[in-house]
C-alpha cells in the first residue's frame, strides 16, 4: 500500500476526530429537553448528561501528555478515537438516564484525550515555519464545531431523534479510525517518565470539582451547598497541585513551561479570548430564544455566520502572519471583537434579524485575527519533546477559560435578570464579554513578535519594537 504524506494524513484524521469531540460539547445542549421527556425526568436532571461529559474531560485531559509519551501519539489518539466512537453508539442506544450519563463519562474520557493528543500530533508533523498553515486547519475545526452544534442538534432532534445526536458520530469516527490505522505513521516515543499519581489525582479531582461549580453555579445559584463545597474544594486542590507539580521531578502537568514567555503570554490571551468568544456563543442563542422567542434551529442559523467569518478571515491571516507576526493581528482582532460584542449589548427586541447576523459574522472575522496567531506563537519555542505536555497544559487552560466565560456571563444574566428585565440582563452580559475581550487585548500588547520568529519567514521577520 502506498504511503501517504503525514502532512496530509495527520490533518485529515485530526479534523474528523476533533470536530466530533468539540461538537459534542454543544450539540447535546439542544437535545436536552427531548432527552428529559424521553426518560420522564425534570429538565435539570437531564443536565447531568452535559456535566458527566465535562467532568470526564477535566479528569483525563491533564494526563494526555504523559500517555502520549508512554504509549505513543498514534496509539493513544486512535484508542481515544475508538473509545469516543464506541461510547457515542452506546449513548444513542441508552435506555435510561443513568445509562446515558455513564456512557457520556466514557465518551468524555476519549474526548479529553483527542484534542490535546491530536494537537501534539499536528505540531510534531509540521515544523514551526509551516505551523501557520497547520494551525489554520486546527482552528477551523475548533471554531466551526461549536458554531455548528445548535444547527445540527436542532436538525437531528426535530427531524429524526435525539439519539442521532450521538449516532451521527459513528460513520465519521469509523472512517477516521480506519484511515488512521492504515496511514498514520508511528513516531519514536520519548523516554517515559514515571506516572505522577499525585499530580493526576490533584489535577483530575481539582479540575472536575472546579468544572462542576462553574457548570452548576450559574443555573442553580452560587449559594447552593454542593456548588460552594465543590468550588472551594476545586480551588484548594488546584492550589495544592501547583505547589506539588512545581516541585515534582516528572510532573504530570509541566507548569514550568509557563516560564517560556511566548507560551505564557499567548496562553493568557487564549484563556481570556476563549472566555469572551465561547461565552458569546453560549450567550447569543440563549438571548435569541428567551428574549426574542426564536426556536433552537432558527437561533442556530442566526448565529452560524460567525463560523463563516472565521473561515474567510483565516485564509487571509494564514498568508500574512509569516510577514507581520502575531501582535499586529491579535490586537485589531481583539479590539474589533470588543466593539462588535459591545454593539450586541445595544440589540433590542425589535432589532432586525439581519443586523444580528451581520454582528455575528463580524465577531467571527474579529476572532479569525486572534486564534491562528495566538496558537501558532504559543508553541513557537517549545521543544519537540515537550510538545505533548505543552499541548495538555494549553488545552486545559482553554477549557477552563471557556467554562469560566460561560459561568461568568450566565451569572451576570442571573444577577441582572432577578428583577424580571431579561433585556437589561443580557445587555450587561454582552458588555461583560466585551470587557473580557479588552482584557485579552491588554495581555496581547505584552507579546513580542521576536518570540515567534521560528514561525515567521526569515527574510521577512519584523523587528520587535516592544
Image (cartoon, rainbow, N blue to C red):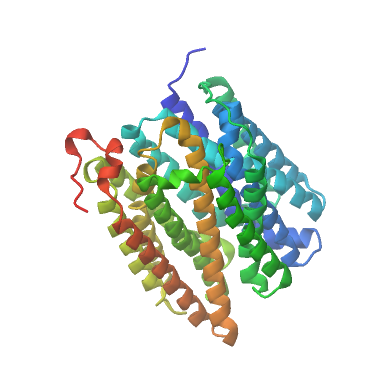
Query: Residue 317, image x and y in percent?
Result: 29, 46
Residue 7 versus residue 112 in the image, above or below: above
The vertical placement of 442 against 162, above or below, is below
Extreme residue toward the bottom, this view? 419
- Examine the rendered structure and indicate whether residue 184 appears above or below residue 369: above
Seen in the picture, residue 39 relative to 316 is either above or below; the reply is: below
Q: Is residue 381 left or right of residue 283?
A: left
Which quadrant of the figure has residue 155? bottom right
The quadrant of the rendering that contains the C terminus is bottom left
Q: Residue at x 61, y 64 (%)?
A: 214
Count of numbered tags? 0
Q: From this viewpoint, is residue 234 visible?
A: yes
Residue 305 pos. (x, y %): 42, 57
Residue displayed at 47% across by 41% down:
390
Give the x, y percent position of residue 370: 35, 53
The front one of 338 and 129 is: 129
Say left or right for 137 vs 420: left
- Return the residue nearer the eye: 131 or 146: 131
Is residue 158 shown to the viewer in this render?
no
Q: Which residue lies at the image location 53% right of the left edge and 40% below the top edge?
A: 116
At 38% across and 50% down in the image, what residue appears?
266
In the orientation shown, which residue stands out farthest toward the front?
A: 247
Residue nearer the viewer, 428 or 117: 117
251 vs 331, left or right, is right
Q: Nearer the viewer, residue 96 or 451?
A: 451
- Residue 403 at what x, y percent from top left? 55, 59
Amino acid at each position: 500500500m502506498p504511503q501517504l504524506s503525514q502532512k496530509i494524513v495527520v490533518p485529515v484524521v485530526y479534523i474528523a476526530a476533533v470536530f466530533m469531540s468539540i461538537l459534542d460539547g454543544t450539540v447535546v445542549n439542544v437535545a436536552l429537553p427531548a432527552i428529559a421527556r424521553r426518560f420522564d425526568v425534570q429538565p435539570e436532571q437531564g443536565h447531568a448528561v452535559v456535566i458527566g461529559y465535562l467532568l470526564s474531560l477535566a479528569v483525563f485531559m491533564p494526563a494526555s501528555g504523559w500517555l502520549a509519551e508512554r504509549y505513543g501519539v498514534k496509539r493513544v489518539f486512535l484508542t481515544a478515537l475508538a473509545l469516543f466512537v464506541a461510547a457515542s453508539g452506546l449513548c444513542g442506544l441508552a435506555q435510561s438516564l443513568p445509562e446515558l450519563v455513564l456512557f457520556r463519562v466514557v465518551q468524555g474520557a476519549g474526548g479529553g484525550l483527542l484534542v490535546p493528543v491530536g494537537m501534539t500530533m499536528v505540531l510534531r508533523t509540521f515544523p514551526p515555519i509551516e505551523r501557520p498553515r497547520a494551525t489554520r486547519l486546527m482552528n477551523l475545526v475548533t471554531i466551526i464545531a461549536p458554531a455548528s452544534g445548535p444547527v445540527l442538534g436542532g436538525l437531528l432532534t426535530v427531524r429524526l431523534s435525539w439519539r442521532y445526536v450521538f449516532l451521527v458520530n459513528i460513520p465519521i469516527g469509523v472512517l477516521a479510525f480506519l484511515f488512521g490505522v492504515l496511514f498514520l505513521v508511528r513516531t519514536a516515543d520519548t523516554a517515559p517518565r514515571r506516572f505522577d499519581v499525585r499530580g493526576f489525582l490533584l489535577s483530575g479531582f481539582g479540575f472536575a470539582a472546579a468544572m462542576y461549580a462553574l457548570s452548576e453555579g450559574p443555573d442553580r445559584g452560587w449559594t447552593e451547598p454542593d456548588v460552594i463545597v465543590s468550588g472551594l474544594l476545586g480551588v484548594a486542590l488546584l492550589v495544592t497541585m501547583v505547589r506539588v507539580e512545581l516541585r515534582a521531578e516528572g510532573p504530570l502537568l509541566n507548569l514550568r513551561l509557563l516560564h517560556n514567555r511566548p507560551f505564557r503570554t499567548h496562553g493568557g490571551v487564549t484563556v481570556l479570548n476563549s472566555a469572551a468568544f465561547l461565552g458569546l456563543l453560549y450567550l447569543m442563542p440563549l438571548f435569541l430564544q428567551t428574549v426574542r422567542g426564536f426556536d433552537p434551529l432558527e437561533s442556530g442559523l442566526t448565529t452560524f455566520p460567525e463560523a463563516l467569518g472565521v473561515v474567510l478571515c483565516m485564509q487571509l491571516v494564514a498568508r500574512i502572519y509569516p510577514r507581520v507576526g502575531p501582535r499586529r493581528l491579535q490586537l485589531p482582532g481583539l479590539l474589533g471583537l470588543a466593539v462588535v460584542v459591545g454593539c450586541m449589548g445595544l440589540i433590542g427586541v425589535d432589532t432586525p434579524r439581519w443586523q444580528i447576523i451581520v454582528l455575528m459574522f463580524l465577531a467571527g472575522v474579529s476572532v479569525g485575527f486572534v486564534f491562528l496567531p495566538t496558537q501558532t506563537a504559543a508553541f513557537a519555542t517549545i521543544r519537540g519533546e515537550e510538545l505533548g505536555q505543552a499541548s495538555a497544559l494549553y488545552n486545559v487552560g482553554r477549557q477552563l477559560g471557556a467554562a469560566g466565560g460561560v459561568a461568568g456571563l450566565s451569572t451576570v444574566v442571573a444577577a441582572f435578570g432577578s428583577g424580571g428585565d431579561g433585556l437589561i440582563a443580557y445587555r450587561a452580559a454582552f458588555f461583560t464579554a466585551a470587557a473580557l475581550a479588552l482584557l485579552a487585548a491588554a495581555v496581547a500588547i505584552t507579546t513580542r513578535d521576536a518570540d515567534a520568529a521560528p514561525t515567521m519567514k526569515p527574510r521577512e521577520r519584523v523587528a520587535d519594537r516592544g
